[in-house]
Image: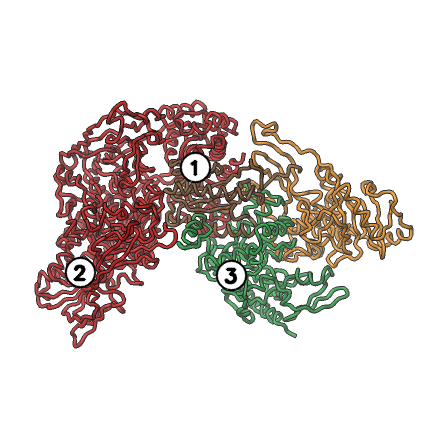
């Protein structure tokens, strides 16, 4: 049997996602992170595009979940040294450096950092500002434990010289004798999520970076924008702290550059990154703010990106299609002067207060060393080499990869790949699922239903964090006078292991049936104390915390008396609230361990196979009479891999798999239920019970019409990309005689009716042009484009095309190419912006790179599963950044073109990711459901349906017969929108009902 | 001389008689003559004979939609909690509906209180209903014993007086500012369209209060609502108040005290109005029925004005228009959010 | 019985003096005069004599069943002296005068006294309240006190009754409480004037014909009469009629808690409200509107008289005038009498 | 306008995911603010109904603060959008009947806006102090009765 554990290297968002997916689906995960905390690059960002979500807000819950996971062994300050063995049975050596702070004792009060006399550059803020030698990299760090930096610690350099931290630490956590450890780990597979390094522009002398104070990088600017950054979110320029008004972003610094940086690839994310910064900076700015972005091609090829770009332009971000030649000081005040060449070749100058370099992504040099040690192949750009048809597989079996270490990519793509890598890593270990994991056992729960409340209150000193301000003893005494409080006690550290053990005994001895802890924040500590209640035989929901540290002693340092009164108030409020709370059931739903996959294209088949190979039965439903979907008309990938053999092989695998039931010419007519237990009816009358569903209903090529018809369907020399592919598949000889071919890009894309970029067409068209040129080197080929969007390493294909002599002529929406015919001869007139004149072409072949549209069936399937669709008919994922394959409806996942246009390899990755997420459900016997849910009082409900409308999860529906609403507890997330929306007060949120909230409010006033 | 209303009354009687005779409906919801001057009494005709009593005049102040849900329910066969739903079509009701009443029926349909298939909406254009109180005020305590309505005037008489007044001068304030006098939804049309009524400032009464200082508004509110006796006539006359248990009657939790404590009374009126937000059609029933003469309608009118200004929606104008509190736009106005105010200020 | 004679200034001066020893309430002409505790009534600073006819907007019962009325208090704090104990408040003994009461309202106190003969708080309020009536020289078209056994010159329940004559006023001192408001130096009325008053009283004497006839009727036939549906069809289930009615005396009790202190309060209830008879089981014996409407009238016109004698209606006509949908108790009486 | 010893009490309803986290961050960062607020943690700003705000005033709050995630950041997808409509109408209604606009306040505070949270509390406390103790809609037992 293989090992039931997996090694994940890298604690950025990709590594965290992979670790969570694996641990949740039954494997023990060793998560190796080289710094003191997980979070990676994403944690350094202020906002994320295209939603402008606060990065820390959306990331933090994942980090906390990772840190608390019973089956994730978090190894910080660690590096993978060696890996031996084979898939299913590796031996890894991980070297862990000393932290010098005992994490089991550290209470994260921060006194060590406060007292530490040694200031060093803050690398988390990219060297902007200072931190101490004893430090926490960022406020939401997981683990929330301080560390001592041995390179700068005075004591560690010269023992005996300082030790201030050890003196003030109230928990005795400082351990200068801490030693490095080598962990030998037995794992079945490995996931590498090593991330990227931002390109260092110092070597590009024309930028002035390092010499000119007000030239900074995008990552640095991100820290300037962040509220937790060095300037608390106030935009300042480095030279004089003034708020900059004129700011320029220079794109492609260290990307698409074969001359200086030797990074020919496109870094994929920088265009959106810069636009986002321009937009956010404009929001931060006080008064006038003029952002300018200097770019070559604007690459906004992701979901929602093009619209973001359009909005940015409308809102005053100016865009200049120009490569900047040099940045020079404009004056002595720190302003800067840019010299650049406009599209027509003219030299221009512009002055700015600050210049931000959109630095590209590159592979870290340590990654290259590690790849060597692990014997992994790298590609010509030093990214870890992967297989086209398995984009997360490395050259070494059993070792998988995800995120930017394999190619520059954005967060959602990294998260998708992380899940896909988790799938692959887990799939080969499927027989060992749950073999290495731990399971928590609890004693039998006491029934307190009929008991009058007996409340116990535990008040925490938190060392001196609370006690130095609040009179903890007085609060404890006071708590004893409150109604129904039968016990109160103060503790030095309520969360310390010995106090927790003692609390279990106290609950039992005092026969407590409600518990209040007055200490720190429930956000970090509620799970721990709830666990304690369960250990003592109480339901975990009869518990409240009063936050007398983060929201009292820490914020009222100079008002001890008021803080003490407030602590009493907060404790009284918690007591009032807990008094009305009741034991809640731990809802679970028994899982039907099978899946339905809708759509028989590459996405659907990949998902089906991924699940079936782990022994889960799958029904694959395809609307048409054959499998394969759009791939049936694809010739090759941009890396020159033929699609048809791969497709044929995949179809054969699907058809021959004993656990896949293929239903062709079949559709879904009805679906109901929730995660773990769906019931779906097919058009053939079949009824399926299944635990999960994957929606991969695909997309379709836009059929040109109106301004964008270009004689398509009228002149037989006009074809779409897919039609040409078909001819190539059929090995047509037609192209041998073609003298001139013209490609028009963006046919039907990036226009008001279809405002999205179809993402694949630039690459597809260029690849096709290259193929035609290879077949017929004499052919003249013109590409009429708006922006070339060969993102990532596809940029190399663009370079190749130009080298082959393919001519690129840009057009814009003011000058759409005009196509006419004269006696069957095509005539194309287009405006060439470089010569600023109209040119005429008379090609033998016109190829239209048409848009990709969602299938109409997507929205009906979405409706069946209560999933959302976006304004354009693409399916809407649960969260654009961090849940790219989930729907808001649990247990339903999406992949492929129904989500957004994407190339084959991305569909495959997404399908595997969807399968990974589905595997989490299928690997469980029952899935937990929210316990704090809404409930309807049928006597009070009038059936007006307001609750149904305001529920974002479709958890509330109407019982049409009785005309009252019903809450599906399995779908309810406990937000309470329905409760607040109900005029009749017919809905309540269990334990957070109006009565409990009112009791807490009332208690605030003694 | 046949007046507009007498012709409409005729038409109503003929229509109701026909519908009942043909058994197309089980009941016709209209008005009959009241026992006092200037009163019309809501009336349910259940037989063709009953229909003789049906009338239409300027005193039909109470919104008939108020009765519709309960009347429909009363016509269903009795059914225990575990009994299956009755089979076959259920009895229908025909109802008179002016502009605002019809809009309330729209909301009742949207909120599942009324089954569209079970109502025959008989649309009547409203010429504005008369406020009894306004007439009485003109006569300053002298008891009015008879009022005869003509198209444009009222002939008012009592002991020792006999006067003629212009009808429009005593039309209710809500009707004076109404721009939707014609039904937005109906099956059968009665009488002529009332047509578009122009109004330069529909919300002048709201603005009058808006323009006061905070202290003045507070004083006004306290005075206006001081005489409330908590009889709930305003609530019960409202076609939108159909909660099985009103929050004021709730004991668990106890939102407010039940007596006429000034704070509790205020909270009742605030929440009653708020619950009508985006649903109120300014039909004026609440104000018309108040035995203490309180103008609680101004609160819902304020909300109506805000809903229109902030979200561009008017209650009950179409069956497929979402109610404003059950929907949102990402760019809804938010200048009341203090963090946005700060951002706005910085942006200036 | 003493009868005094006043001219207008004399009367006003006399009334004004009362307010030196006790608050004097009078029917407030508009809301701004409202005293707050008793809606519709003002606390007199200037003497305003009532108009010639018709009852005040609000009935008198607010002085006998004020809402809220505190029945008991307690503390929820363990350590307080009255922690978790119910304590009755000290009796309220301060005198108050209500002026401008019509005979119909005065009579309502007598009627309410029938069921509340032993009700402590009602009696306490009765004891401390002096009622000064004003007879109705010109009853309104909606007044029907005589039909219910009352009279526009009736003295039931009143302590003093003032009657307006052509150019003077006569004040009859009816009770000892009333006598305490009288003082030395008032002018006795002459026998001629008293004779006119007695004649008016005789000529306007009430009868209770309809009440007596109804008492003889078979309850079950009334109960199942078909007109109830017609009456209830228009009813809104609001409480305007019961809250304005001087003889409706139903109440509910609720505990209110604020800042750790509790009050058990009594406030008006209405048999028109569906909640009125809702049982804790969820069953409601009067769940239908028609049942509630029928109950209200049957109680007033049949059940109350069967038990106590008079109708539970003084014919003030408030419900007739103020019913939002014009349900008219006079029509209901006729309907009941017409039942075979 | 009031005696110097008077300190307002302000009830703050904070959503768990953004504003409560922002309040925690203010603590972690040691941003000091006046001790007048009493925080009530709720899942989402969409959980707070006008009833609860009125209840806070009735109970004696001198000020109320409701704070949720910024638009688009709601953990529950759309709770704050619905809340925003409810509050907009309700705030206007309160103003209409003469409640001072500064009594009842709404804000968006994200989990990373610790400093902003502290600033808001300072600001709201100052505004409420300026207004003096709440007098409208504050329930008092009639002790004489």
Secondary element at image label 1: loop
Task: State which chain disc 3 sits on.
Answer: B
Quadrant for the C terminus of chain B, please. Answer: bottom left
Between disc 3 and disc 1, the foreground one is: 1
Circle 3 is placed at which residue position?
A: B103
Q: Which chain is orange?
A: C
Q: Is residue B317 left or right of residue A410?
A: right
Task: State which chain disc 2 sits on.
Answer: A
Image quarter for residue A189?
top left
Q: Is residue A107 left or right of residue A769?
A: right
Q: Which chain is brown?
A: D
Q: Residue furthest right?
A: C191
Between disc 2 and disc 3, the foreground one is: 2
Instruction: Specify few, some or many for label 1: CA neighbours under 10 Å numbering under 14, 14-19, or 20 or more.
Output: many
Instruction: Specify few, some or many for label 3: CA neighbours under 10 Å numbering under 14, 14-19, or 20 or more.
Output: many
Between disc 1 and disc 2, the foreground one is: 1
Which color is chain A depicted in? red
Q: Which chain is green?
A: B
Circle 2 is placed at which residue position?
A: A765
* Labels 2 and 3 positioned on one and the same chain: no
Quadrant for the N terminus of chain B, please. Answer: bottom right
């Amino acid at each position: 049997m293989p090992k039931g554990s997996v090694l994940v290297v890298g604690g950025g968002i990709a590594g965290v996602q992979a670790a969570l997916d694996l641990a949740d689906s039954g494997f023990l995960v060793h998560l190796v992170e080289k710094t003191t905390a997980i979070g990676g690059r994403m944690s350094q960002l202020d906002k994320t595009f295209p939603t402008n979500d606060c990065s820390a807000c959306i990331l933090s819950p994942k980090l906390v979940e990772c840190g608390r996971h019973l089956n994730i062994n978090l190894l910080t300050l660690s590096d993978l040294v060696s890996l031996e063995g084979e898939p299913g049975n590796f031996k890894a050596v991980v070297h862990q450096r000393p932290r010098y702070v005992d994490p089991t004792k550290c209470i994260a009060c921060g006194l060590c950092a406060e007292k530490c006399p040694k200031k060093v550059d803050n690398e988390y803020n990219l060297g902007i500002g200072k931190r101490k030698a004893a430090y926490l990299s960022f406020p939401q760090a997981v683990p929330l434990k301080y560390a001592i930096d041995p390179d700068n610690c005075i004591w560690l350099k010269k023992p005996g010289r300082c030790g201030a931290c050890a003196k003030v630490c109230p928990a005795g956590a400082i351990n200068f004798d801490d030693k490095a450890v080598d962990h030998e780990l037995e794992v079945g597979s490995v996931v590498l999520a090593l991330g990227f390094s931002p390109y260092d522009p110092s070597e590009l002398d024309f930028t002035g970076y390092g010499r000119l104070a007000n030239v900074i990088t995008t990552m640095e600017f991100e820290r300037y924008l962040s509220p937790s950054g060095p300037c608390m979110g106030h935009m300042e320029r480095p030279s004089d702290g003034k708020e900059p008004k004129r700011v320029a972003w220079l794109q492609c610094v260290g990307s698409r550059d074969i001359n200086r940086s030797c990074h020919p690839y496109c870094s994929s994310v920088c265009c959106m990154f810069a636009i986002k910064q321009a937009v956010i900076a404009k929001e931060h700015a006080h008064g006038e703010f003029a952002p300018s972005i200097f770019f070559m091609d604007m690459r906004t090829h992701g979901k929602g990106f093009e619209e973001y770009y359009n909005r940015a332009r409308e809102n005053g971000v100016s865009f200049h299609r120009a490569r900047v030649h040099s940045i020079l000081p404009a004056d002595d005040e720190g302003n800067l002067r840019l010299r650049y060449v406009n599209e027509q070749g003219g030299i221009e100058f512009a002055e700015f207060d600050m210049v931000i370099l959109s630095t590209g992504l590159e592979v870290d040099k340590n990654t290259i060393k590690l790849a060597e040690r692990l014997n992994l192949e790298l590609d010509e750009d030093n990214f870890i080499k992967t297989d086209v048809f398995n984009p997360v597989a490395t050259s070494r079996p059993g070792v998988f990869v995800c995120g930017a270490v394999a190619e520059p990519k954005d967060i959602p793509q990294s998260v998708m790949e992380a899940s896909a890598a988790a799938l692959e890593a887990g799939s080969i270990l499927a027989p060992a699922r749950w073999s290495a994991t731990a399971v928590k056992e609890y004693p039998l729960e006491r029934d307190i239903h009929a008991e009058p409340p007996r409340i116990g209150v535990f008040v925490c000193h938190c060392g001196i964090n609370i006690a130095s301000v609040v009179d903890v003893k007085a609060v404890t005494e006071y708590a004893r006078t409150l109604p129904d409080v039968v016990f109160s006690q103060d503790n030095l550290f309520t969360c310390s292991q010995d106090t927790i053990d003692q609390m279990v005994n106290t609950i039992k001895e005092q026969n407590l049936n409600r518990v209040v802890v007055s200490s720190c924040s429930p956000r970090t500590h509620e799970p721990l104390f709830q666990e304690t209640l369960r250990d003592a035989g109480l339901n975990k929901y009869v518990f409240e915390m009063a936050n007398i540290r983060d929201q009292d002693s820490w914020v009222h340092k100079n008002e001890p008396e008021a803080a003490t009164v407030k602590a009493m108030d907060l404790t009284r409020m918690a007591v009032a609230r807990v008094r009305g709370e009741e034991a809640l059931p731990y809802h679970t739903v028994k899982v039907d361990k099978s899946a339905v996959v809708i759509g028989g294209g590459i996405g659907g088949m990949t998902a089906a196979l991924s699940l079936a190979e782990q022994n889960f039965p799958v029904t694959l439903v395809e609307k048409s009479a054959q499998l394969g979907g759009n791939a049936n008309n694809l010739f090759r990938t941009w890396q020159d891999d033929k699609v048809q053999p791969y497709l044929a092989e995949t179809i054969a695998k699907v058809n021959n798999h004993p656990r896949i039931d293929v239903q062709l010419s079949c559709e879904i007519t009805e679906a109901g239920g929730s995660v773990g237990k769906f019931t779906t009816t097919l058009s053939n009358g079949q009824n399926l019970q299944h635990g999960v569903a994957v929606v991969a209903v695909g997309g379709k090529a836009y059929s040109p019409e109106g301004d964008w018809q270009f004689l398509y369907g009228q002149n037989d020399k006009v074809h779409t990309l897919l039609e040409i592919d078909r001819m190539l598949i059929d090995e047509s000889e037609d192209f041998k005689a073609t003298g001139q071919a013209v490609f028009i890009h963006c046919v039907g894309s990036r226009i008001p009716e279809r405002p999205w970029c179809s993402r694949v067409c630039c690459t597809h068209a260029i690849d096709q042009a290259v193929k035609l040129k290879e077949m017929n080197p004499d052919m003249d080929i013109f590409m009429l484009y708006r922006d070339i969007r060969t993102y990532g390493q596809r940029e190399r294909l663009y370079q190749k095309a130009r080298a082959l002599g393919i001519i690129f002529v840009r057009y814009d929406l003011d000058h759409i190419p005009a196509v006419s015919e004269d006696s069957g001869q095509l005539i194309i007139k287009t405006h060439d912006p470089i010569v600023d004149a109209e040119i005429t072409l008379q090609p033998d072949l016109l190829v239209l790179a048409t848009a990709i549209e969602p299938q109409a069936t997507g929205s009906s399937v979405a409706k069946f599963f209560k999933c959302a669709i976006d304004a354009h008919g693409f399916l809407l994922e649960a969260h654009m950044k961090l849940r790219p394959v989930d729907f808001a409806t649990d247990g339903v996942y999406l992949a492929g073109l129904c989500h957004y246009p994407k190339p084959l390899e991305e569909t495959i990755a997404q399908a595997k990711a969807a399968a990974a997420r589905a595997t989490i459900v299928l690997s469980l016997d029952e899935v937990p459901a929210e316990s704090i849910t809404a409930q309807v009082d049928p006597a009070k409900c009038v059936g007006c349906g307001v609750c149904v409308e305001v529920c974002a999860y479709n958890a509330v529906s109407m019982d049409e017969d009785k005309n009252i609403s019903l809450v599906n507890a399995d779908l309810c997330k406990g937000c309470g929108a329905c409760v607040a929306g109900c005029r009749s007060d017919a809905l309540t949120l269990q334990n957070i009902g109006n009565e409990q909230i009112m009791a807490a409010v009332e208690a605030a006033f003694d | 001389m046949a007046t507009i209303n007498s012709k409409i009354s005729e038409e109503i009687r003929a229509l109701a008689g026909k519908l009942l005779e043909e058994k197309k409906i089980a009941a016709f919801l209209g008005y009959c003559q009241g026992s006092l001057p200037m009163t019309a009494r809501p009336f349910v005709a259940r037989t063709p004979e009953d229909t003789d009593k049906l009338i239409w005049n300027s005193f039909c102040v109470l919104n008939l939609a108020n009765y519709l849900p309960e009347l429909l329910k009363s016509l269903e066969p009795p059914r225990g909690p575990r009994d299956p739903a009755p089979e076959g079509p259920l009895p229908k009701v025909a109802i008179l509906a002016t502009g605002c009443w019809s809009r309330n029926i729209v909301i009742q349909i949207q909120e599942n209180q009324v089954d569209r298939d079970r109502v025959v909406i008989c649309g009547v254009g409203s010429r504005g209903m008369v406020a009894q109180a306004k007439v009485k005020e003109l006569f300053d305590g002298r008891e009015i014993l008879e009022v005869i309505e003509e198209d444009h005037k009222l002939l008012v008489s009592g002991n020792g007086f006999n006067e003629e007044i212009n009808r429009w001068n005593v039309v209710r304030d809500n009707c004076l500012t109404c721009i939707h006098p014609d039904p937005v939804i109906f099956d059968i049309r009665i009488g002529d369209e009332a047509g578009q009524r122009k109004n330069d400032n529909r919300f002048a009464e709201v603005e009058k209060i808006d323009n006061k200082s905070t202290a003045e508004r507070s004083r006004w509110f306290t005075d206006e609502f001081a005489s409330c006796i908590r009889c709930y006539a305003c609530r019960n006359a409202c076609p939108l108040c159909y909660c099985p248990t009103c929050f004021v009657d709730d004991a668990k939790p106890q939102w407010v005290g039940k007596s006429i404590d000034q704070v509790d009374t205020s909270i009742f009126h605030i929440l009653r109005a708020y619950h009508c937000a985006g649903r109120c059609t300014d039909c004026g029933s609440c104000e018309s029925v108040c035995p203490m003469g309180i103008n609680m309608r101004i609160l819902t009118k304020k909300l109506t004005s805000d809903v229109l200004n902030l979200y561009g929606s008017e209650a009950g104008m179409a069956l497929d228009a979402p109610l404003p509190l059950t929907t949102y736009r990402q760019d809804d106005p938010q200048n009341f959010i203090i963090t946005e105010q700060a951002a706005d200020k910085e942006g200036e | 019985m003493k009868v005094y004679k006043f001219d207008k200034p004399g009367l006003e001066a006399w009334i004004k003096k009362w307010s030196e020893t006790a608050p004097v309430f009078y029917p407030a002409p508009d809301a701004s005069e409202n005293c707050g505790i008793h809606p519709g009534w003002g606390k007199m600073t200037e003497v305003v004599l009532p108009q010639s006819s018709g009852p005040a907007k609000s009935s008198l019962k607010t002085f006998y069943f004020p809402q809220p009325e505190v029945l008991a208090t307690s503390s929820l704090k363990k350590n307080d002296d009255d922690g978790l104990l119910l304590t009755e408040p000290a009796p309220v003994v301060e005198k108050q005068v209500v002026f401008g009461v019509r005979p119909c309202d005065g009579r309502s106190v007598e009627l309410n006294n029938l069921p509340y003969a032993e009700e402590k708080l009602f009696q306490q309020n009765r004891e401390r309240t002096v009622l000064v009536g004003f007879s109705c020289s010109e009853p309104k078209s909606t007044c029907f006190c005589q039909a219910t056994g009352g009279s526009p010159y009736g003295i039931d329940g009143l302590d003093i009754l003032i009657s307006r004559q052509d150019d003077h006023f006569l004040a009859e001192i009816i009770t000892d409480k009333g006598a305490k408001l009288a003082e030395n130096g008032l002018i006795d009325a002459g026998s001629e004037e008293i004779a006119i008053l007695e004649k008016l009283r005789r000529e306007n004497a009430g009868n209770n014909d309809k009440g007596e006839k109804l008492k003889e009727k078979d309850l079950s036939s009334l109960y199942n009469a078909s007109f109830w549906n017609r009456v209830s069809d228009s009813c809104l289930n609001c409480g305007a009629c019961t809250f304005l009615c001087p003889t409706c005396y139903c109440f509910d009790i609720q505990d209110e808690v604020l800042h750790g202190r509790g009050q058990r309060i009594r406030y008006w209830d209405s048999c028109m409200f569906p909640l009125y008879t809702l049982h804790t089981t969820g069953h409601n014996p009067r769940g239908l509107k028609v049942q509630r409407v029928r109950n209200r009238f049957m109680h007033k016109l049949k059940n109350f008289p069967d038990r106590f004698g008079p109708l539970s209606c003084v014919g003030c006509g408030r419900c007739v005038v103020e019913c939002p949908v014009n349900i008219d108790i006079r029509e209901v009486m006729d309907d009941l009498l017409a039942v075979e | 306008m009031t005696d110097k010893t008077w300190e307002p009490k302000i009830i703050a309803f904070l959503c768990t995911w953004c504003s409560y986290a922002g309040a925690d961050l203010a603590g972690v960062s040691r941003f000091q603010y006046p001790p007048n607020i009493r925080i009530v943690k709720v899942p989402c700003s969409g959980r707070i109904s006008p009833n609860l705000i009125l209840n806070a005033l009735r109970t004696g709050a001198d000020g109320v603060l409701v704070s949720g995630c910024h638009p688009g950041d709601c953990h529950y997808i759309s709770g704050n959008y619905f809340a925003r409509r409810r509050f907009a109408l309700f705030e206007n209604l309160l103003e209409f009947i003469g409640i001072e606009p500064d009594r009842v306040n709404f804000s968006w505070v994200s989990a990373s806006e610790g400093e902003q949270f502290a600033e808001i509390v300072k600001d709201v406390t100052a505004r409420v102090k300026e207004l003096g103790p709440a007098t409208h809609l504050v329930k008092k037992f009639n002790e004489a009765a």
